[in-house]
């Protein structure tokens, strides 16, 4: 009887685990992301220490020399940043043309899947998330730092954001993944920039381990991190995420 009971419990655990899939909306994704990145991690763009206390993320701005630029409230809280902005993947959907993000959340299952994709979510300082907005990534060699020792630059007039060198490859591989999975277009200049970042900042052991942790919820990895796929100019997207979401 004990053996049968043990087998039954094991089977139930297997079926429960197998039934857990990728998050179906942004709210669910944020909860899962908190578990993936806890108990300690660093903010994505600035590298500030983050700890979780009673399921709440707590920032230590002094750990990375961050200085508040303008918004103290947002600077002291963690927000979940879409590395590829919702505007970038949303405006390529018809739902965005018919009513923006709110309409997409309400009517488009593919958009909801993109918005909730855990590979595209990173814990960031709220003020940095706001300053990045939906600005495109690029290099700003002549721009001055505006957030203390945090190694980012923002050109608000040109709507350009330069991330720190140690995460540029991570960003590139997220862009490759999102474009390939959801059949999103990347301009020629975007592809060239991301390919350069991918080469200059290769996959680290930490990024690979995070890829494996996220895969437990998403039920697949980022193949541009694992090395199963390699981007090139003129890459043909598979679009497998569009089929799954539909």
Image: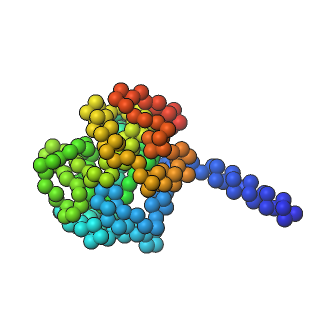
Relative image position of residue 213 (x, y in whole percent): 51, 54
Q: Residue at x 28, y 66 (%)?
A: 64
Q: Residue at x 27, y 63 (%)?
A: 74
Q: Camera-side residue: 115 or 202?
A: 202
Rendering quarter of residue 180: top left
**Residue at the farthest right position:** 1
User: From what the image shows, is residue 226 above or below residue 56?
Assistant: above
Left or right of residue 2: residue 157: left
User: From what the image shows, is residue 64 above or below residue 104?
Assistant: below
Relative image position of residue 219 (x, y in whole percent): 56, 46
Q: Camera-side residue: 174 or 34?
A: 174
Can you see residue 103?
no
Left or right of residue 145: residue 174: right
User: From what the image shows, is residue 230 above or below residue 34?
Assistant: above
Relative image position of residue 136 (x, y in whole percent): 25, 42
Q: Residue at x 87, y 63 (%)?
A: 1
């Amino acid at each position: 009887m004990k053996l049968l009971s043990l087998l039954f419990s094991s089977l139930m655990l297997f079926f429960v685990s197998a039934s857990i899939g990728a998050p179906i909306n942004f709210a669910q994704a944020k909860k899962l992301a908190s578990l993936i990145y806890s108990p300690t991690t660093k903010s994505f763009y600035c590298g500030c220490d983050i700890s979780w206390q009673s399921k709440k993320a707590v920032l230590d701005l002094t750990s990375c020399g961050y200085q508040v630029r303008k918004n103290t409230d947002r600077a002291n809280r963690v927000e979940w940043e879409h590395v590829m902005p919702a505007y970038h993947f949303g405006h390529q959907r018809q739902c965005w043309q018919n009513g923006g993000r709110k309409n997409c959340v309400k009517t488009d299952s593919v958009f909801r899947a993109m918005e909730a994709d855990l590979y595209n979510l990173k814990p960031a300082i709220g003020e940095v998330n706001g300053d990045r907005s939906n600005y495109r990534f690029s290099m700003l060699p002549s721009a001055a730092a505006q957030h203390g020792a945090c190694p980012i630059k923002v050109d608000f007039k040109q709507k350009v954001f330069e991330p720190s060198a140690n995460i540029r490859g991570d960003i590139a591989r997220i862009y490759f993944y999102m474009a390939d999975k959801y059949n999103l277009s990347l301009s020629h200049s975007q592809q060239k920039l991301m390919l350069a970042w991918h080469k200059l900042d290769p996959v680290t052991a930490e990024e690979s381990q995070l890829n494996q942790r996220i895969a437990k919820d998403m039920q697949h990895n980022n193949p541009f991190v694992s090395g199963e796929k390699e981007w090139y100019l003129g890459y043909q997207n598979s679009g497998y995420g569009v089929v799954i979401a539909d």
